[in-house]
Image (cartoon, rainbow, N blue to C red):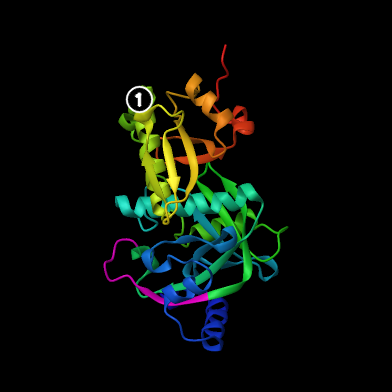
Amino acid sequence: MDKEVDPKVLAVIDEMRLSGPRLTPVEIVAKMGVFDAREKPFDHAWLATGDNVIATIWAEFVNIGAGGHWFCLESLDTQHRVGGGVRSPQQIQRAKDRRALLKRTVDAGQGFRAVLQTNRVAIAELESNKSAKVSTRVRDDAEWHVASWDSDQQLAILVRGPRGWVPGEAEIQAAKARGSVPVAAVADAGAAAAERSASREEVQAAAMDYVMRHFKGYGYNAEDVTGQKLGYDLEVSNAKGAKLLRVVVKGTSTGVPSFRLTDEERASSAREPLWRLLVVADAIGTAAQHKIYKPSEMEQAPGFEPLD
């Protein structure tokens, strides 16, 4: 809610809102290059034309640090809501998609574009109150970037403006006190044990499910052709039916840390121009992530085991 926003931040948002055309929250994202914005009105991050990442920044969580730098803390915990409690499956998927897009900018050394948003309910209720709706959303012309990414602490720091500045420890602790990061949940020993004891088949099934949802979430068609013994698992095509990728999917986890390619898959990698290796790390855990490798890069994939 507006009253939770730093007055200096709110003043900037109001100036942006009054100086630009009156657009709906979805129209703003669509005009930034997200063609399927209307199909994803509740997402928190999008991939726009030119491989530009757009992410929502909740103004209620924006802090002003030394020198007037804006920053906010980003929870990398995809399972738990900021206000407390476990997310629904849809909320988990949206959180995973946002995390993956932000990580994409980290890996590429790029910034991202932001939409600044205030909400009609208290920010802690954003994912639990059915009345939660966008109050104000504006495009921020200043670039943001991920200044820090700590998977162990499940925490990233997002900063507005040029690189080179990060908040100090006192500023980070003050930001945490605003409630933007959920209290770490006690690890479920049973779930951890299940992950360790999962079979290779279970890990592979989870990886396939993850990848199918990933491609379909971006509007691509993903067909499972594993049974055809073609040397790859999925054929990915666009809405017009044009083949984009032929993908071998491999999953890893705590109990299954490595994988091998079959002779069939290796042969296909040599003859098929669209062949790619996609590895899903932590496939059955809470923070599944993937990366795609060309045939020339596949030996660099974590967990790759060469032939004896």
Q: 57 above or below 102?
A: below
- Which image quarter is the C terminus in? top right
Residue reaching furthest to the left: 130
- Which image quarter is the N terminus in? bottom left
| Residue 132 showing in the rendered view | yes
Could you tell me which residue is drawn at 55 percent across and 30 percent down?
269
Amino acid on which disc 1 is placed: Glu
SS state under label 1: helix
The answer to which image quadrant residue 11 occupies is: bottom right
Q: Position of residue 102 (x, y in %)?
A: 54, 53
Q: Is residue 137 magenta?
A: yes
The answer to which image quadrant residue 118 occupies is: bottom left
157 vs 229, left or right, is right
Q: Position of residue 23 (x, y in %)?
A: 45, 82
Q: Position of residue 153 (x, y in %)?
A: 52, 43
Residue numbers of the magenta segment: 127-138
Q: 198 above or below 107?
A: above
Q: Is residue 53 magenta?
A: no
Q: Nearer the viewer, residue 300 or 295?
A: 295
Q: Which residue is mark 1?
A: 201
Q: Nearer the viewer, residue 153 or 91?
A: 91
212 vs 106, left or right, is left
Residue reaching furthest to the right: 164
| Residue 284 showing in the rendered view | no
172 vs 191, left or right, is right
Could you tell me which residue is drawn at 44 percent across and 60 percent down?
179
Q: Position of residue 189 (x, y in %)?
A: 34, 30
Q: How many numbered marks appear?
A: 1
